[in-house]
């Protein structure tokens, strides 16, 4: 998410869809819903982020359809989402994100084998957490359960 160069009133999003663009309409709806919560234009001198001059509600929302890795089945979309998000976050933390609209090489290099490995890792994490919390009360953000 960011302001596109030369278009101070444009709020731009990148959409990585492992299902060949099948979710473009939903992605655009999410971008339109998130845009009012973001400040997509630079703030003028003297203005603080608490009092932005232009929210994305007044901006055009642009959705860049990114050419990311594609899934070979109908059930790995969530794992692709996590894998791409992890890569993008790591690049952002390292200050290595490419310009808006450019697919990072690390994302282009993501293969079905990497996604399979990530899925196995997620499954192992869930099973390990269940084993640790078996028979204990476990609190989460929206529930409290007792496993027996």
Image (cartoon, grey):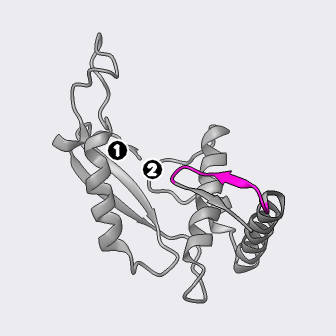
Local secondary structure at mark 1: loop
Picture quarter containing residue 8? top left
Q: Is residue 141 magenta?
A: yes
Q: Residue 6 at what x, y percent from top left?
A: 29, 39
**Stretch in magenta:** 134-142
Q: Main secondary structure of the magenta part?
A: loop
Q: Is residue 30 above or below residue 26?
A: above
Residue at 58% across / 46% down in the picture? 97
Which of disc 2 and disc 1 is earlier in sequence?
1
Residue under numbered circle 1: 4
Which label belongs to residue 100?
2
- Answer yes or no: do the residues labelled 1 and 2 have beta carbons within 8 Å? yes
Q: Residues within 10 Å of mark 2 (few under 14, many from 20)?
A: some
**116 is higher (above) or lower (below) than 130:** below
Q: 53 above or below 76? A: above
Point 26% across, 25% down: residue: 52
């Amino acid at each position: 998410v960011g302001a596109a160069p030369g278009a101070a009133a444009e709020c731009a999003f990148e959409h990585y869809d492992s299902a060949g663009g099948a979710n473009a309409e939903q992605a655009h709806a999410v971008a339109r819903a998130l845009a009012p919560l973001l400040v997509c234009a630079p703030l003028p001198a003297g203005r603080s982020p608490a009092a932005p001059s232009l929210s994305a509600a007044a901006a055009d929302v642009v959705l860049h359809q990114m050419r990311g890795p594609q899934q070979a089945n109908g059930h790995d979309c969530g794992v692709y989402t996590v894998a791409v998000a992890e890569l993008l976050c790591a690049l952002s933390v390292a200050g290595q994100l490419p310009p808006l609209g450019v697919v990072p090489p690390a994302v282009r290099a993501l293969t079905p084998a990497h996604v399979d490995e990530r899925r196995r890792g997620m499954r192992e994490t869930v099973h390990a957490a269940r084993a640790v919390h078996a028979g204990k009360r476990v609190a989460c953000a929206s529930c409290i359960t007792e496993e027996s």
